[in-house]
Amino acid sequence: DAKTTQPNSMESNEEEPVHLPCNHSTISGTDYIHWYRQLPSQGPEYVIHGLTSNVNNRMASLAIAEDRKSSTLILHRATLRDAAVYYCILVSSNTGKLIFGQGTTLQVKP
Amino acid sequence: DGGITQSPKYLFRKEGQNVTLSCEQNLNHDAMYWYRQDPGQGLRLIYYSQIVNDFQKGDIAEGYSVSREKKESFPLTVTSAQKNPTAFYLCASSIPGHHETQYFGPGTRLLVL
């Protein structure tokens, strides 16, 4: 299973954009890039996913590098409620399994 | 309201005891999953089921057992063979597909007395 590498922690100021990076140099052509986030003592929550093209939804945007070896989750205006652990996950189209790393802990300062 | 429920929120286990964690979903999803999360770590897959009456071992299945007799329910039993059961257990479901979104329950925290 292909792995991802994320910074352990990041800080942001409230109402500023946040760019959360993820490296996945061993990604295969059929792996999807998924992002989930987890608030303390809660289950993870789906944020966004993509394959090759950049994606936007009401929560965030996902920018995928042309070679697909890295991606960036973009929160356009961070709020205090966005403070969470963000997981970048490669999902194999063969198995559908999620392989979680340690994620990035995002702190949002007022 | 559609969603996934897990009970209880907290569960205490005595040495040598089997305990069962409940997971129910009314999303009409065929696939269900059990994960374990240790402090400061990501989730690890214990068991998953793509359809009723069928399930497969995940990465850390030893000391656990599951059943899938109904589409809505996927209970997890933590057996006495699991020597380090203290963790946060999360259940999820999805439409079976190779990249489908998983929806997670609120979790059960298991503690050993």
Image (spheres, coloured by chain):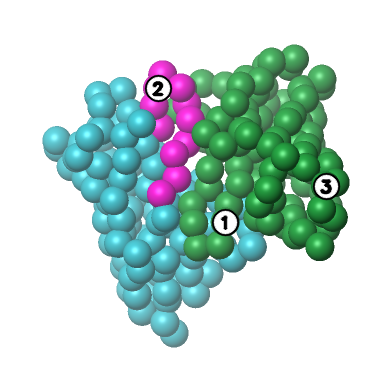
Res B33 quadrant in image: top right
Q: Position of residue B35 (x, y in %)?
A: 60, 42
For disc 3, the marked residue is B16
Image side of residue A20 versus residue B61, left or right: left
Q: Quadrant of residue A56?
A: top left
Choose mark 1 or mark 2, whichever is in front: 1
Quadrant, the N terminus of chain B: top right
Residue wearing tag 1: B38
- Chain designation of label 3: B
Which type of secondary structure does the marked residue at label 2 adopt? Answer: loop
Spatial separation of the CA atoms under disc 3 and disc 2: 40 Å
Tag 1's secondary structure?
loop
Which marked residue is nearer to the observer: mark 3 or mark 1? 3
* Residue B71 appears left or right of A47: right
Question: In this view of the protein, which residue sits in the foreground, B111 or B89?
Answer: B111
At which x and y percent is residue B79?
Answer: 77, 39
- In the displayed structure, B46 sits above or below B30; it is below
Please state the chain letter of the residue tagged with numbered disc 1 in the rendered image.
B
Amino acid type, label 1: Asp
Residue at image position (31%, 45%) is A4
